[in-house]
Amino acid sequence: MNRQFGEAILDLKNVSLVFGGVKALTDISFDVREHEIRAIIGPNGAGKSSMLNVINGVYRPQQGEIILRGRHFARMNPYKAAKAGISRTFQNIALFKGMSVIDNIMTGRNLKIGTNLLLQAIWWGPARREELAHRAKVEEVIDFLEIQHIRKTPVGRLPYGLQKRVDLGRALAMEPSILLLDEPMAGMNVEEKQDMCRFILDVNDQFGTTIVLIEHDMGVVMDISDRVVVLDYGRKIGDGTPDEVRADPEVISAYLGASH
Amino acid sequence: MLYRENGQFKTSYAADQQIFPIAQDRWAILAIVAFAFVGVPLLVDEYLFRAILIPFLILALAALGVNILVGFCGQITLGAGAFMAVGAYAAYNFHIRIEDLPLLMSLLLGGLTSAVVGIFFGIPSLRVRGLYLAVATLAAQFFTDWVFLRVPWFTDNAASGSVSVSNLRIMGWQIDTPVSKYLFCLAFLTIFALLAKNMTRCAIGRQWMAIRDMDVAAEVIGIRPLFAKLSAFAVSSFFVGTAGALWGFIHLASWEPAAFSVDRSFQLLFMVIIGGLGSIMGSFFGAAFIVILPIALNQFLPALGGLFGVSISTAGVSHAELITFGALIIFFLIKEPHGIARLWSTGKEKLRLWPFPH
Amino acid sequence: MGFFLETLIGGLMAGMLYSLVALGFVLIFKASGVFNFAQGAMVLFAALAMARFSAWIPEWLGIDSRFLANTVAFLVSAALMFVVAWLIERLVLRYLVNQEGATLLMATLGIAYVLEGVGTSIFGSDIYKIDVGMPKDPVMILEGTFEGGLLINKEDLVAALVAAILVGLLALFFQKTTTGRALRAVADDHQAAQSIGIPLNRIWVIVWCVAGVVALVAGVIWGSKLGVQFSLVTVALRGLPVVILGGLTSIPGAIIGGLIIGVGEKLSEVYLGPMIGGGIEIWFAYQLALLFLLFRPQGLFGEKIIDRV
């Protein structure tokens, strides 16, 4: 496989995050290059989800900074992150349960909607045109993810695997340049995992989206990612290509629990 | 067999995103609106207008507003009555203080004032949630109760504390008969319901619902909670305030702060919960239920007592009314926590497939 | 200075009573996640029962001693509150396990209507007196320290004492007994508690009984001060800002919140009232609580919520 990567698009420098007395992340630095698939792995409680939450501003680290396309952010917030083209999916599926699949994915278009409340209230001219144009875009996402048959179903009624797919759809509708995926394959069977892998690779390939991914299934991680960061107890213990990481003695001991 | 959507193919997204995508629904709704405007005024007597129809229309408008905030944006409010009061008293002050201000303007300005006050009392929602917020909204209720009772400026120094309006006309049309009041309120409700429906099916509605269902995720996809929540408070208070102005001007004509007490707030919340949270249709069902129930009980209970040879005193009736009302609310919450609107849509779903169960 | 202290002490006394009402809310919220709007109706119901029984029982049983009559009336009213609690669990809560907070809140409003209706049907809707022999005369204290001393109502003093004892007992019950721990587990998650074998229904009956007794005590105290009448229902609404100030799940919060609100109300009434017009106590507590919430959304002692995604 001959893949082309750009410059580092996202750079994390010495990030530390503390909750009360608990150190969730300690002095972590790594970068993400444009168009690559970057995996974050580690045992439960290693701080993987916290890492994603720091990147898109849900948590605010006490120390360190985030450099996104050369811009420095000491503090990110979710809105700024979304504006800057970062979107994400969630470990425990954070879909809007009372809304249909279409409406859920339409929310992903939110930042691209320009008309104001008054125009929307009278459903007139620009508001109506805009709504229909975004609907067309959303239908593209729906086609891409092969979920046409459930487009009007309330998401609360969908099985788990499909909910995960809708979650991805909502993130894709934002047309992100960086996509953060928090355990996209957790709790899926083999077929569903294969489908999800295909979607992730297609997104990366067709749209050139940079992907940061947390995943527990080592087979999947080693297969699809370009570079891997390994966390343990909130510290970075490994970083490199899948092969390098696999051979790293510290990583092996963290996973197998061998004594040093 | 009439209720089928076979053969109604949609060839554009516009057709798919209509308010009523099924043709039969469209015709039915048009027929109902036409009947409300033309048929009802010919058929109904004065008592029905005064006791049921006008209160129903105005409270349905208020319920729509409450539903936008509670049902669509998920912010529980126990202070809706306060915003009705703000709307009514603001409209009153515009009406008496500005010479020749058209009635329509007074009413809408009342609504707008209420929207501004709504934004102010919505600020806590940015910090607190759920039941804490519910209690915080009571602050608005008690504060406005006090203001309109104790600050004489708002009531134009009326000695009795009650204010009244008379001789209402709009473009030469005198609004004094029950029929004209009814039509006036109906026009308001029709237009506002359409606006509400449009908002809730558009981007702003999706923002509200996203905040309601999962606020962290909403923020992550770029929805600003500040804007979403405060806009819901503003729109909701605008609706409720306009309803309050209508309640004062059209229904009561002369009123005091007690007309918008905390009981009114509870009543409005009942309407949206019994009618159906997050449903425009539900607001109408809920308002109808709450308006008709006490009247029905009032008629029915003495008759029932007479059947068993017991005469029920007026006080007895009002106690029995309280009990039945409370019991019915509990019954409804247990049997259908999603409200009448859910029953309605399940019914329609069944009808579409009839005679097959699935 | 003497006047300020008098106001302060008056506020603390009133605050103790608020704490008592707030305690009813917190107990039920902690144990069932229900925000009990019927607390006010329960206070009214209990006070009505107490007032009427203490008048009826001497007639029925021919008891002359007022103390004995009051004791019997109190016990009968407490028993009645147990029945009410049992019925509420049996007829309402049982069917609403795992519903949303708003639905439960509405249900308690329904309960409130029923209680008010039933209470006034059985016991009548006039204004009644409860006479438990509380001393009405004021006392002077600290005459040596201040010129003129401090004037304090003995009645308030007794009431505050009773409230304090009850609050202490309940705090012990919650923190130190197995039932207390089970209550806290149920509040956290109905289903999880049920799945580890905590008998949900019994727990709810217990906690509503306790809240019923708290309502009874509050009803007796308020009733003997103000007379038993329909407006007692609003006493509960006065307790609400206390709850959000102190934190919905915290017993110490209810106590300290009550004291803060009591003092704040009295001071504002005396020093602020004349400036902006009377009657501000109906909203002052709410604004105070609201302002406070902006800085500490979970209340003084409430648990902080960390969002996890």
Image (spheres, rainbow, N blue to C red):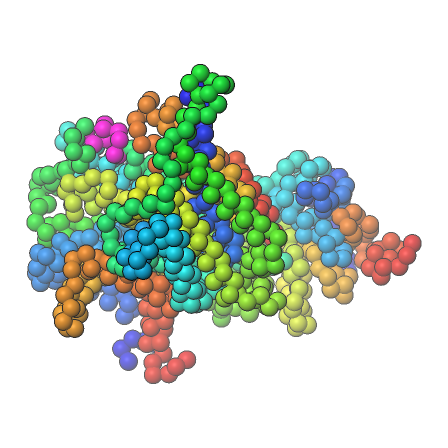
Q: Which percent across, then down, holds residue A147? A: 53, 67
Residue B152 is inside the magenta segment = yes
The residue that appears at 35% across and 49% down in the rendered structure is C66
Residue farthest to the top?
C147
Q: Which residues are magenta?
A: B148-156
Q: Choose between B186 and B315: the one closer to the eye.
A: B315
Q: Which percent across, then down, holds residue B91? A: 22, 37
* Observer able to see residue A130: no
Q: Determine the main secondary structure of the stretch shown in magenta.
A: helix
Rendered-image quadrant of the N terminus of chain A? bottom right
The residue that appears at 40% across and 63% down in the rendered structure is C83
The residue that appears at 78% across and 47% down in the rendered structure is A235
Residue B24: quadrant of the picture:
bottom left
Residue C243 is inside the magenta segment = no
Q: Is residue C4 left or right of residue A212?
A: left
User: Above or below — where is A60 with respect to C173?
Assistant: above
